[in-house]
């Protein structure tokens, strides 16, 4: 029988403390270190939207997960919070595979904002390799000056001519 409920607003999911603890260092710490949650029947998880929480609970019980364009970023954030490293790695690999001239800068900024160094490095490599295409994308023109300078000053930047870099600095 389930001995804990995970809740986001009014949506509740029944689970087992032992299963959650075995799968997640986050839950293990929550249920074994004398936190208030040890005695509670319902644990409120305000930071995880219900569909993402449901997906992660299913993963904990089945070992299977569906990562897609619509859920990858929220899944990665929630999995990182819950210390579900397999899911974080899966999301990282998904985003690395999805890198394209139209989204590379956005993926880089997401990775930087969530301390995902491996993904950030992959995005930077992609940006450097595909700079002639990326420099014409809308994301490029929205870059803060410090990031623009970082990309343009890289010795690994692949360009057809130096003029491409010069014209983008103007």
Image: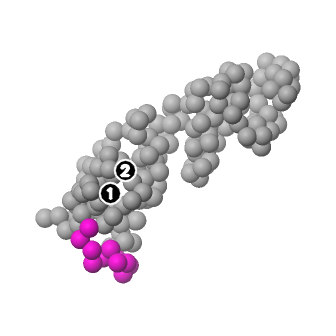
Q: Is residue 27 visible?
A: yes
Q: Position of residue 124 (x, y in %)?
A: 67, 37
- Cα distance in 3D space between marks 2 and 1: 7 Å
> Which quadrant of the figure contains the C terminus?
top right
Q: Position of residue 54 (x, y in %)?
A: 29, 49
Mark 1 sits on what residue? 8
Using residue 2 as the reference point, say whether residue 49 is left or right of it: right
Asked if 67 appears above or below 131 in the picture, the reply is below
Q: Is residue 127 visible?
A: no
Residue at x 22% of width, y 61% of height: 15
- Specify start and end residues of the magenta stretch as a single range: 32-42
Q: Nearer the viewer, residue 87 or 57?
A: 57
Earlier-in-chain disc, 2 versus 1: 1
Residue 48 has which mark? none
Say if mark 2 contacts mark 1, CB within 8 Å: yes
Magenta stretch contains residue 39: yes
Number of residue marks: 2
Mark 2 sits on what residue? 49
Q: Nearer the viewer, residue 42 or 85?
A: 42
Magenta stretch contains residue 22: no
Tag 1, which secondary structure?
strand
Outermost residue toward the bottom? 34
Using residue 144 as the reference point, say whether residue 78 is left or right of it: left
């Amino acid at each position: 029988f389930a001995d804990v409920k995970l809740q986001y607003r009014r949506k509740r999911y029944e689970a087992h403390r032992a299963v959650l603890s075995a799968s997640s260092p986050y839950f293990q710490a929550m249920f074994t270190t004398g936190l208030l949650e040890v005695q509670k029947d319902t644990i409120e998880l305000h930071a995880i939207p219900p569909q993402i929480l449901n997906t992660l609970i299913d993963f904990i019980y089945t070992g299977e997960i569906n990562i897609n364009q619509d859920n990858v970023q929220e899944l990665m954030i929630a999995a990182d919070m819950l210390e579900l490293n397999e899911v974080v790695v899966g999301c990282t690999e998904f985003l690395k595979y999805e890198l394209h001239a139209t989204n590379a800068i956005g993926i880089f900024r997401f990775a930087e904002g969530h301390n995902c160094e491996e993904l950030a490095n992959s995005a930077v490599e992609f940006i450097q390799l595909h700079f002639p295409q990326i420099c014409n994308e809308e994301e490029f023109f929205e870059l803060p000056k410090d990031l623009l300078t970082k990309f343009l000053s890289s010795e690994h930047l692949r360009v057809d001519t130096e003029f491409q870099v010069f014209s983008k600095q103007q």
